[in-house]
Image (cartoon, helix red, strand yellow):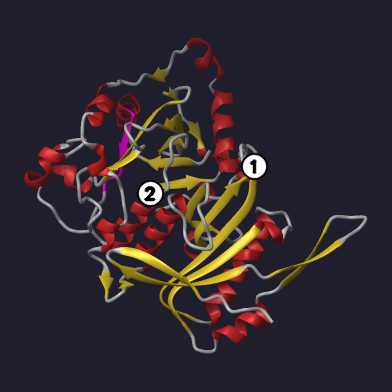
Amino acid sequence: MAGYVFAIGGDTEIIKICAERGVYATRLNSLASRPFEATLADYVSMKPGDNVYFFSERKIYGIGELVAVGPDCKYSNFPGSSTCAAVDYADVRDDLLVDSGEDSVWYRWLCTFKASPYFFEEGIDTDEVLVYKPNTFKMLRAFWNVSFIKLGDEENESLKEILLLRHQQEMRTGQCVWERNEEIHDLIGAHELDRYLIKPESLLCNCVRADRVKHEMALEVSVVYDLCNEGIPNLGRWDYVSHQVVASPFKPINYMDKIDVFAARYLEGTRIPCQYLTIELKKDKAEKSTIDQVLKYVDWVCAEYAYGDYEMIEACIIAADYEDDLNEYYREVVRRYYTLGSHPVRNKQWNRLKLLRYSCIDNRIVYEDVTPQIR
C-alpha cells in the first residue's frame, strides 16, 4: 500500500499521543490558499490500508495503518472545514470530531489508524533508512518544508521492511511499543459521519471565478478526489493517486520538477502496477510548452516506473482552455517510438496523451475531451 510520513516537532511525546489515540490531524499555520489546498489534496487520496509513520528530529517512527471508522479513514474535523475561511471556535465546538480547545479551528482534517503491527518507541535515523534499498526511495529524499508526504507502494514497502528488521526484538517481546486506546475511535464513530466526509465542493464554493478555479492547487484537489472515487471520463478510476510527485534527478528541492497528479492502476487481485497516469494541470490556458512539459514527465515515468514500456503509460492535460493552434503542434510531437521484446522485436508507437477541458458547475469540476485526432 501507499504510506504517509507525518512531520512532528521535536517532542516524541506528541508521537506517543497520536499513536495511542490512533488519530492524526495536521495543524495549519494560516489560511493561505496553497498550503491549505495542498494539505487537503493529500487527505482526499488516503485509503484504508495505507501505512502511517512519524518523522521527528531526523528519525522515523512506525508502523501504523489507516483504518476506517465508519465509512472512511479520513474526515473533516467539523462540517465545512474544507472551506478556506476563518471560523470561531465557539461556532464549531459542538460539532468537532476531536476537540483540541481553541486551536481546533486550525486542525481542519484528521485520519484514523491503528498500529500495524506496532508503533515502536525507538525511531530509526533517516540516513539508515535511505541506505536500505536506496533506489526505491524517491519522495522521502525530497521531504522538506511540508507537514507530511505520501510514499508510493515500492518506497513504502522498503520503509516498512527496514523498520521491521530493526525492531525484531520488540516484535518478539511486545516491549518498547506504544499501545492504542480505542476510546477516541469510539467517540468519533458516535457522530453522524456522513456530515464529515471530505469532498471538494466545500473548497470550490469559495475559490471559483466564473467557471474557473482561482488556484491551480484547488483543481488538483478535485482531480485527485475524482480519480480516487467515481473516476474522470476517458481516464477512469485509479487505485493509487498522489500529487506533486518528484520527476527529476535529485537536486536542490526548490528546483525539482514535480508531476501535478500521478496515479497507478493494479492488475486485478494484485498489487502489481499495470498502468501509470501522469497529469499536468492548468487553471487557465494550456500552451505548446504544456505539451512539452507533460511529455517530459511521460519519458521520466517510462524510465523510472515502467522500465521502457510506454504501453503502460497514459497522460493527460486538464486546462480551462487551449491555444488556438495547439492541435497541429500536438500531432507533430506527441508520438513516441519504442521497441519491446526480443526474437522477434516488436516496434511500437505511443500517442496516449489526452487533452481535457474543465469547467466548474455547481461547485464540481466537469470534464470535456478535446483530444485532437491523429492523422
Tell me the CA gap for discs 2 and 1: 23 Å
Judging by the rendered image, the residue that carries numbered circle 1 is: 272
Q: Which residue is located at x 52 percent, y 51 percent?
A: 238
- Residue 310 drawn at (x, y percent): 70, 61
Does residue 22 appear to the left or right of 118 in the view shown?
left
Q: Which residue is located at x 21 percent, y 33 percent?
A: 191
> Which is more toward the observer, 5 or 88?
88
Query: Eyeballing the image, is 121 above or below 327?
Result: above
Residue 256 can be seen, yes or no: no
Residue at the far right: name it. 343
> Which is more toward the observer, 207 or 258?
207
Residue at the far left: name it. 90
Query: Eyeballing the image, is 177 above or below 268?
Result: above
Q: Quadrant of the C terminus?
A: bottom right
Q: Residues within 10 Å of mark 2 (few under 14, many from 20)?
A: many
Corner quadrant of residue 107: top left
The secondary element bearing badge 1 is classed as: loop
- Residue 13 drawn at (x, y percent): 31, 28
The secondary element bearing badge 2 is classed as: helix
Q: Which amino acid lies under the numbered mark 2 shown in the image of this protein? A: Val
Residue at the far top: name it. 173
Specify start and end residues of the magenta stretch as a single range. 22-27
Q: How crowded is mark 1: few (under 14 residues within 10 Å), some or many (20 or more)?
A: few
- The numbered dot on residue 44 is 2
Asked if residue 192 lies in the magenta stretch, the reply is: no
